[in-house]
Amino acid sequence: MGFQDWFAQKSRKWAALRQKPAMRLFIWSTWIPVAICFLDHAYFLGHISGNSMTPALNPDSNLGKRDIVLLQKFLIKQPGYLKVGDVVLLRNPMDPDKFLCKRILGVGGDEIVTRHPYPQKTCFVPFNHVWVEGDNIHSFDSNNFGPVSLGLMHGKCPKVLWPFNRFGAIPDGGREARKEKLGYVDDVVEG
Amino acid sequence: MFGIFSRIPVELRTAVSIAVRAGCAIHFFRMHIFESSLTYGPSMIPTLDEKGDFVNIDKLKSRGRGVQVGDVVVAIKPTTSDQRVCKRISGMPGDIILIDHERSDNEFIQVPKGHCWVTGDNLSMSLDSRTYRAMPLALVKGKIIAAHSFARGFRFLPNTLEDAAEDELITNTVTLVEDEPVEVATTSS
């Protein structure tokens, strides 16, 4: 028996084996890691709960329903990719198993005028860090825990997918917090 | 269904399909379960060599799940998000840490909730929490359980701080035992 015959015999056996239900199930299941890698590194969906991004996400017109957003997973940890105004999902620095959805108000190198719970009036954001805040004033954000590293970023939210009447880009919002854009002077010299 | 794909020979299609599936399976395994990769740098020198050491990383311990003080971990560097560092955890949430024993001001800091304090074993050549302060546990990507290299062979990386804690416990129990017999003797007689 030559190689050709041997190969043809093996091919016929393999073709017969492939038709068995258990084998078909196994062959389909080998696509599961491919799907997981796509969801880990390309795109995923994000459920937004809580009202810290109201009114850009979860507005009162939702009547308690939660928004579903598209999550972009690639490029987000690259230094300089995320810009001021982007909405991101990040891991909670105070609780590693939970996520926060916030808007970026300052990137590395900016000086930020902070809000109430933060101990200083202004804060310099180190390089490869961002300053995140919710659009709503009742929000657990960088005013509580300071600038966060880009390594905590989980995804960028470019689009709202659900509900359909607000399908599309996430509306602008949030305050301007950069000191140079505000013309803010923190030490007033009294004459 | 896909007219363009049917022009490609079936052998090539099968080969590419199997390569994609195998590659993704290996990548998933390396990301979430176990990884063995090469390290370099002088920051862990008595434990890991400057170059040529491979570390075996238990990725199930990512995000600080089940790590404790004294474990060697791999984490994303907070100041450079595309690099990873190997460090030893020297403080968990709530611990009060002496920032740098070589500085004259004895400044202490309490590690915040959800953070950890990491230092290299080679304190004089290490860029660690003494510079970038407490690091979020979410940046921890896994625990290093063993290392191997051609020069030093395979060895497990034990938790070097556990033994010290056990010694302390033993001395405490010894002092308790020394105190007790006096009381026992007085009450029983």
Image (spheres, coloured by chain):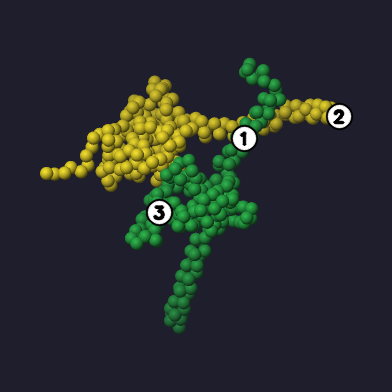
Eye-nearest disc, 1 or 3: 3
Image quadrant where one finds the C terminus of chain B: bottom left
Q: Is residue A11 left or right of residue B32?
A: right
Give yes or no for contact between labels 1 and 2 (Cβ–Cβ under 8 Å). no
Eye-nearest disc, 2 or 3: 3
Chain letter, colour green in render: B
Relative to residue A123, is residue A16 depicted above or below?
above
The chain letter for the residue carrying disc 2 is: A
Tell me the amino acid under the disc marked 1: Gly
Q: Considering depth in this image, is A139 or B186 the residue closer to the camera? A: A139
Outermost residue, bottom side: B189
Tell me the amino acid under the disc marked 2: Gly
* Helix, strand or loop for disc 2: loop
- The residue wearing badge 3 is B130
The chain letter for the residue carrying disc 1 is: B
Q: Which mark is residue A2?
A: 2
Q: Is residue A188 left or right of residue B85?
A: left
**Residue ID at (59%, 32%):** A34
The chain letter for the residue carrying disc 3 is: B
- The residue wearing badge 1 is B23
Q: Considering depth in this image, is B174 or A107 the residue closer to the camera? A: A107
Q: Is residue B13 left or right of residue A135?
A: right
Number of marks drawn: 3
Chain letter, colour yellow in render: A
Please tell me how crowded label 2 is: few (under 14), some (14-19), or many (20+) other residues with Cα within 10 Å: few
Residue B117 locus on image (x, y percent): 43, 53
Q: Determine the CA span between mark 1 and mark 2.
A: 34 Å
Outermost residue, right side: A1
Tell me the amino acid under the disc marked 3: Arg
Image quadrant where one finds the N terminus of chain B: top right
